[in-house]
Amino acid sequence: MKACCFCMLIWVLALTGLSYAGRPLNIDDPFPVELHKFQIETGAGYAGVDSNNHFDVPLTLTYGVLPNIETQVGLGGQFDSRKDDDDETEYEQGLSDMTLSFKWNFLRHDQAFFDHGLSGTIKLPTASRRRGLGTGKVDYDLTYIIQKDLNDRASILFNLGYTWTGDREEGDVIRYGLAIIYQWTDRLAPVAELVFETPIEGELTSMGSNVGIRYAINDTLTLDAAIGKKVAGDWPDWTSTVGLTWVF
């Protein structure tokens, strides 16, 4: 049973990782990196189910290829500690799955009330399936994104995505969620989100919450931190993350 819960933890993390947004959110925004600029995002994350623990060090590189389109490559490392059926702790470490992504801001709010975006991701199985660090399959994801500025400080975001999984036993998943960003000061912005995942095969919907902050040191470097909790279903009991975003 513990092993099953841990496998579900890895599965949920793999899915949410497909749409990983501006740190520390999972919900994405519709805006790409500026034309001919690079963005590096990195940090450290934790997720736990029962006595099983998962740590990761994500790294993504994003480039603005067109005024309204970005491309991204993601790879990182991960470390797991797990309790087996005999209540002994096992440890595994290795690469995470590689992701190749794009994001397209195809409509702006002055044209269609909301800012609209579309993102797509291919997840390549660079993580070891034998060691329980990944599914060993190629996954595909397509996500529709909208954002509405409520006023000069607050914005609300909505994502609706579909993940085609290479693992036929798990089946495809519909992902959706809401997030709010509040620009408290010029440098500090609290963020919060609710994320949902519904398996196509008819299993119960899972839901998680996440709250955090962003702090802009300057125009190019932003720090972040967040903590999350399971609300329902097969979601990690607790998650946390710290990291930074550098644009140059």
Image (cartoon, helix red, strand yellow):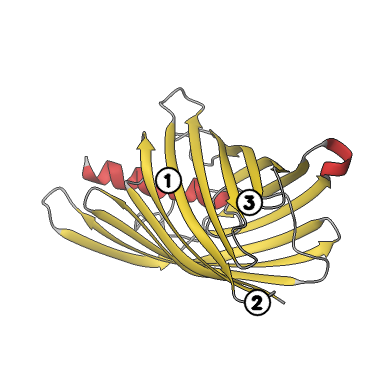
Q: Disc 1 residue type? A: Trp
Which residue is the site of mark 3?
122
Which mark, residue 218?
Answer: 2
Marks 2, 3: nearer the viewer: 2
Q: Is residue 19 visible?
A: no
Q: In the picture, residue 131 is in which quadrant? A: bottom left
Q: How would you rate the neighbour count of disc 2 (Cα within 10 Å): few for under 14, some for 14-19, many for 20 or more?
A: few
Disc on the earlier residue, 3 or 1: 1
Residue type at tag 3: Ile
User: Disc 2 on helix, strand or loop?
Assistant: loop
Residue 241's quadrant in the figure?
Answer: bottom left
Residue 65 percent coordinates (x, y): 82, 64
Q: Is residue 186 visible in the rendered structure shown here?
A: yes
Q: Look at 37% across and 34% down and name the residue there.
A: 232
Q: Is residue 48 above or below residue 141?
A: below
| SS label for mark 3 | strand
- Image point 51% across, 60% down: which residue? 213
Spatial CA span between label 3 and label 1: 15 Å
Query: Which of 13 and 133 lies nearest the eye of the viewer?
Result: 13
- Amino acid at circle 2: Asn
Q: Can you say which quadrant of the picture contains the N terminus?
A: top left
Q: Specify the label residue 11 is tagged with.
A: 1
Residue visible at 47% across and 25% down in the picture: 201
Residue 199: % across, % down: 48, 30
Q: Height in image: 92 above or below 156?
A: below
Identified at 79% across, 65% down, the residue is: 34
In space, the residues marked 2 and 3 are separated at their CA atoms by 32 Å
Label 1 environment density (alpha carbons within 10 Å; few <14, some 14–19, many ≥20): some
Q: Provide residue 37's location: percent of width, then percent of height.
A: 77, 71
Quadrant for the C terminus in the image: bottom right
Mark with earlier residue (2, 3): 3
Residue pushed farthest right? Answer: 111
